[in-house]
Structure formats: C-alpha cells, structure tokens
Amino acid sequence: MSRTGEELMRRVLGPAGPELTCEACFEHVDRFVELELRDGVAAAEAAVPGMTAHLEGCPACAEEHALLRSLLRAA
Amino acid sequence: MVSPGDSTDVVSPAAPAAAFVDDADAWLMALRGEGAERERALAELHELLLRAARFTVRRALEQRTHLREAFDDLAQQSADDALVAVLAKLDTFRGESRFTTWAYKFAVLEASVALRRHAWQGREIPLEDDGWRSLHGGDPSPGERAESRELLDALPAAIEQALTSHQRRVLVAVALEDVPIDVLAERLGTTRGALYKTLHDARRRLRAALEARGFELDGDVGRAGR
C-alpha cells in the first residue's frame, strides 16, 4: 500500500466525534451545502451537527456532497 | 473531507428551469397539480435533473475514462430515477434549501450510485476478513511521529481481537480496499445505511480497544500517541 500511516489510521479509525447516519446526511446535505457556500463550513456544521464528521468517515457521502457543492458553485 | 474536484470549469450545470427558477411554491403547486401545467413542470424538472446527472457523470469521467461510452445512458437513467424519487418525496420538502438544490441531490445520488455500480460491474469484491494482516503504512513519512507509528503497529492486533469477522470484512473492503459502500451493500444484500453502521461500530470498538491499551486518540488520529 502506498498510503501513509496517518492516512491509513484515518481510514480505519474514522472520525472521532458524533456523526450523522448516511440517511440523515442525505436528508440534510442540500441545506448544509447552501449554508457552507454562503456562510462557510463552520456555520454549516453548527446548523447540521455531525455532518462534517460523517463526510470524513463515509467516502460515498463525501463524494456526493462534493459533487452537489461543485454543481451549485458552477451554477 | 473528500473533495473529488472543486474546479468550476468542467461543465456548465443546471440553469434552473425558466418558469419556476427557485420558487419552491410554484414548483410544488405545479407538481401537485394536474393537466398541462403539471406536464410542463415535470418536463422542466426532468431537464433540471438530467443536467445535474450529466454534471455528476462528467466529473466521474475525468477520472474514469473507461466509462465514457456509458455516459448518456447513465445520465438519462439517473435523471429518470431521480424524477421518480423527487415526486415520491415531494411531501418531505420542507423549504430548508432551494427547491432546485433539494432536487439536485437526488440526481447526484442516483448518478453517483449508478457510476459506482457500473465501475464495479463484474469485478470481484475482496471480502477476506484477514485483509488487515497486510496492514502497514509503508515507510515512515518525514515528520511522522514515533507515537503514530506505534499506533499503526498496534492496529492489526486490535482489529483481530476487538472486531467480529463481519466487521473486519466490512472495514477491510471499505476502508482499505476502496470498495464503495453502496456497491458492497448491494453484493451483501443489505443497505448502505446498515453497512455504514457496521463500519461505525467497528471503528468505535477499535478506538476503545486502542485506548484501553494506553493510546490517547484525539480527533486527528494521525497525531495520536501514548
């Protein structure tokens, strides 16, 4: 494996704090992304606690979040 | 946070539908209505979802060129599926985002899932529960702390002792082998949410096991130490 030890640990151990489920992530991701683009990620996380941690731990949700954000930024 | 591409120069995505733009009430009234007005709203919504699906698929093609020939089919099918999902969930729209943003997420989800499944079609999924035995982080990177290396060295034993066989297989497949969680869920006959819970529980167990061995794990595990 070419990953660094630190990356491996992050992948294996995941985020430390409380996080949303995949279902809750999908439910709130539209609101989160709009807040993130308008007010920054800290404000978005404050409105949707646990979203950032889930995006760190779930590659699929992270991919979809990034795509939605890119879509809105390009609009 | 994983961010597969944030540049804005790839494709021009959806311009909101002309008649409704971001007026959620107009969208909802038309979609819940009847006759020609509803048909027009459905057509505009489908066009909007198709643009979002195409945006998603084009982004994926930047990294997965072998998918190019499937582009149109994937985008069309994803937009069709997203339209069905949006209409089925219409009553759950609470106006916490623009209607178009809310609708886009269905197209992004459908297209992303379709792309991941297409990419793994016919591929064998590694499901060995001992895949972690080869876990190692390569040579220490400059600046990597001895404590981090010590933690990495302790991981295999913690995985073996703290996790069930099922948890180990999910952890190895998703976290180490990069198997998309929805692809794995489909192969195992379960849901993405259920599988993520398995992964989440496995990670919690691992953290507890490592902390019981004296490791102090903060949010940034790359800087953990005893």
Image: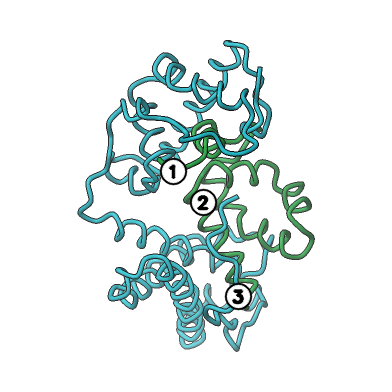
User: Dot 3 surroundings within 10 Å: few (below 14), some, or many (20 or more)?
Assistant: some
Circle number at residue A61: 2
Q: Nearer the viewer, mark 3 or mark 2?
A: 3
What's under tag 3, amino acid-wise?
Thr
What's under tag 1, amino acid-wise?
Ser
Which residue lies under the disc numbered 3? B8
- The quadrant in which residue B103 appears is bottom right
Identify which residue, B75 or A5, lies in the foreground.
A5
- On whether disc 3 and disc 1 are found on a single subunit, the reply is no
Nearer the N terminus, badge 2 or badge 1? Answer: 1
Check disc 3 and report its element: helix, strand or loop. loop
- On whether disc 3 and disc 2 are found on a single subunit, the reply is no
- Outermost residue, top side: B213
Q: Is residue B145 above or below residue B190?
A: above
Q: Identify the residue at image location x=52%, y=34%.
A: A5
Check disc 1 and report its element: helix, strand or loop. loop
